[in-house]
Amino acid sequence: MRIIVTGLIGQYAFGGVMWDYIQYALGFRALGHEVWYLEDTGAWAYDPVKMEPSADCSHNTAYLARVMPDFDMGERWLYRNAADGTWHGAAGAEKILASADVLANVSGACWLQPETASIPLKLFLDGDPMFTQIGLASAPQSEYAKRVAAHERHFSFGLNIGHPDCEVPCAGLHWRPTVQPIALDYWRGGSLEEKNPHVADGAWTTVMNWASYAPKEFHGRKYGQKDIEFERFLTLPRMTREKFVLAMGQGVGNKRPTEMLESQGWKIIEPDRYLPDYTTYRNFLSRSKGEWSIAKNGYVRSKSGWFSCRSACYLAAGKPVVVQDTGWSAHLPSGDGVIAFNTPEEAAAALDRISENYPHHAQAARSYAETHFDAQKVCADLLA
């Protein structure tokens, strides 16, 4: 089949954004399908230098032209500039889309236009459970809700949606569980700069924003960001002998309390300096001892069952993960290579447990990725 995978690789041409989307394309291609990558967000291009929207998409398209060949995608990409409606990338965009069989709308990145709305099978892939559904349930007659409903199938990283203890509203849609596909071959063999000292060496790390956007309210309850959850674990470095290095964005309003965090034993580094592109992002994960991370308060409070696409990449690199439980442990195993926690004491115990038998947990981490996140298997499930 001809499958169109959407994303934000060019729109946000920095850091690990590439991995969130390209691995869908690689998974479908591994199944033998003809795959094209599409960006048609309906929003003006984002200029990462000026850090503002721009009518000029040349930086974004130049980035796509540079990185897509690294994944053997060559010129199989399309980009529509929302400012003037012009197409960039491969010639004949309308013809390519008109003959497509499947649209994989990853994170809803594609704002359906006539060309994409007419594709026979449209898959909506939600990576932000609870927050996506609050938007749909709060404004069911909105243009956004109508476009989401126009997809034939709806999937979510919220593995727990539909279960009695889960607070995520279905908003009139049937949500199927799914996880991040990982192109395993791209995570084998460690970093690209193994001989050079690295800030992540020997440390438990993660990549995060202090707060990506403002809290959302639904039925009188507020669902917030990672800053709320992090406050519960501020003293963790004092509870263990482990080293922590966090690539942490300032977040909305630039309110990251850097001095306070570092006074508690957390080393904070700037993502735009240390992780400017997808290769440095992969190096950071691959050089880490493993990942320790909390989740957005909205994921935890709603018991959504969200499991991070970033954590799946750590696992593929053979790095154990100790991550906050959002309800995912009812659907994915916790124990070897991957350990869920709810309290600071549980997190400290998990870190100590892995350190006591690190080779075992590192091997288990890679096996876990192969079992649960293999891109070919995940993408086959989406089409089943």
Image: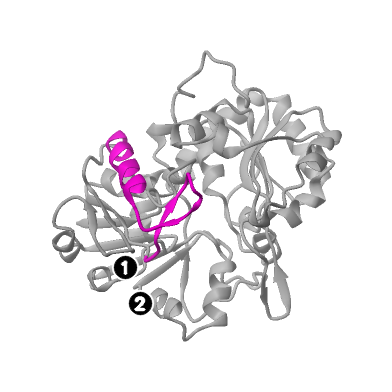
The one nearer the camera, 90 or 253, is 253
99 w.r.t. 34: above or below: below
Magenta residues?
A: 42-70
Q: Earlier in the sequence, mark 2 or mark 1?
A: 1
**Residue at the image position 23 percent from the left and 70 percent from the top:** 120
57 w.r.t. 151: above or below: above
Q: Quadrant of residue 38?
A: bottom left
17 w.r.t. 172: above or below: above
Which quadrant does the N terminus fall into? bottom left
Give residue 189's mark. Answer: none
Q: Position of residue 18 (x, y in %)?
A: 42, 44
Q: Position of residue 130 (x, y in %)?
A: 59, 68
Query: How busy is the neighbourhood of tag 1: few (under 14 within 10 Å), some, or many (20 plus)?
Result: many
Q: Position of residue 263 (x, y in %)?
A: 84, 36
Position of 157 with respect to 60 (left or right) is: right
345 part of magenta stretch: no
Q: Name the amino acid type tagged 1.
A: Lys
Task: Using the rendered image of the protein, determine whether residue 27 is visible from the camera's viewpoint.
Answer: no
Q: Name the amino acid type tagged 2.
A: Ala
What residue sits right under mark 1 in the picture? 122
Tags 2 and 1 touching, CB below 8 Å = yes
Q: Position of residue 320 (x, y in %)?
A: 61, 34
**Residue at the image position 48 percent from the left and 42 percent from the top:** 16
Query: How busy is the neighbourhood of tag 2: few (under 14 within 10 Å), some, or many (20 plus)?
Result: some
Task: Using the rendered image of the protein, determine whether residue 140 is visible from the camera's viewpoint.
Answer: yes
What residue sits right under mark 2 in the picture? 150
Which quadrant does the C terminus fall into? bottom left
In space, the residues marked 2 and 1 are separated at their CA atoms by 8 Å
Scheme by which the image is coloured: one colour
